[in-house]
Amino acid sequence: MGTIAETLKRLQGHKVYLDTNVFIYFLDRNPDYFRLVAPIIEAVESGLIIGCTGDVTIAEILVKPYQSGNLELVASIKAFFRMENFLSIYPHDAETFDLAAQSRAKYNQKFIDALHYATAIRYGCTFFITNDCSIKSGNSLEVILLSSCTF
């Protein structure tokens, strides 16, 4: 795929859906992927790319802090996603769920992956950044795997 800098240049000005793993790597400062996802988050913050995700992303990220009873971390994560002029967070309505069902049927995806994919398509994203190699590019959405990017 190329370097993260080259990838971000390609994404400039586009609506880009960020999968849950992008935020987990960033918030947890994952030693293997933080250096790749930090520039993505910075590009969203600066407006270089139009960052998008779905409500389900926040729910997925909050599971572990709720399991451990870490309510300070829960509050911190919620504040992160509420930052002004940062990220578009889209709801999952009936049309999105229907599109997810179609995607799951067509591509044999796990439901959560199909929901992310459908949300990206529904709200006009042209790129989808993930590290889940089971999510594939389609006619209207190009999937970028973090594992294929370099520093």
Image (cartoon, rainbow, N blue to C red):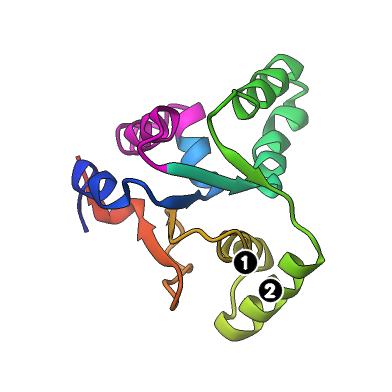
Question: Could you say whether the residue bearing mark 1 is in a helix, strand or loop?
Answer: helix
Q: Residues within 10 Å of mark 1 (few under 14, many from 20)?
A: many
**Looking at the rendering, which quadrant does residue 98 occupy?**
bottom right
**Looking at the rendering, which quadrant does residue 145 occupy?**
bottom left
In the image, farthest residue toward the right:
94
Position of residue 3 in the picture relative to residue 100 (left or right): left
Q: Total of numbered circles in the picture?
A: 2
Q: Main secondary structure of the magenta part?
A: helix
For label 2, the residue is 99
- Please provide the residue range marked out in magenta: 26-49
In the rendered image, residue 128 lying in the magenta stretch gets the answer no
Q: Is the residue under label 1 in contact with that under label 2 (CB below 8 Å)? A: yes
**Looking at the rendering, which quadrant does residue 29 occupy?**
top left
Residue occupying the point 59% across, 73% down: 109
In the rendered image, residue 38 lying in the magenta stretch gets the answer yes
In the image, farthest residue toward the bottom:
106
- Look at the picture and state if 84 lies above or below 108: above
Specify the quadrant that holds the N terminus: bottom left
- Look at the picture and state if 68 lies above or below 107: above
Position of residue 28 in the picture relative to residue 43 (left or right): right
- Look at the picture and state if 45 lies above or below 24: above
- Mark closer to the chain start, 2 or 1: 2
Question: Could you say whether the residue bearing mark 2 is in a helix, strand or loop?
Answer: helix
Using the image, tell me which numbered label, if any, was put on residue 118.
1
Q: CA distance from mark 2 to mark 1?
A: 6 Å
Of residues 77 and 147, which is closer to you in this image? 77
Amino acid at pointer 2:
Leu
Using the image, tell me which numbered label, if any, was put on residue 58.
none
| Image spot of residue 20 (x, y percent) | 56, 46
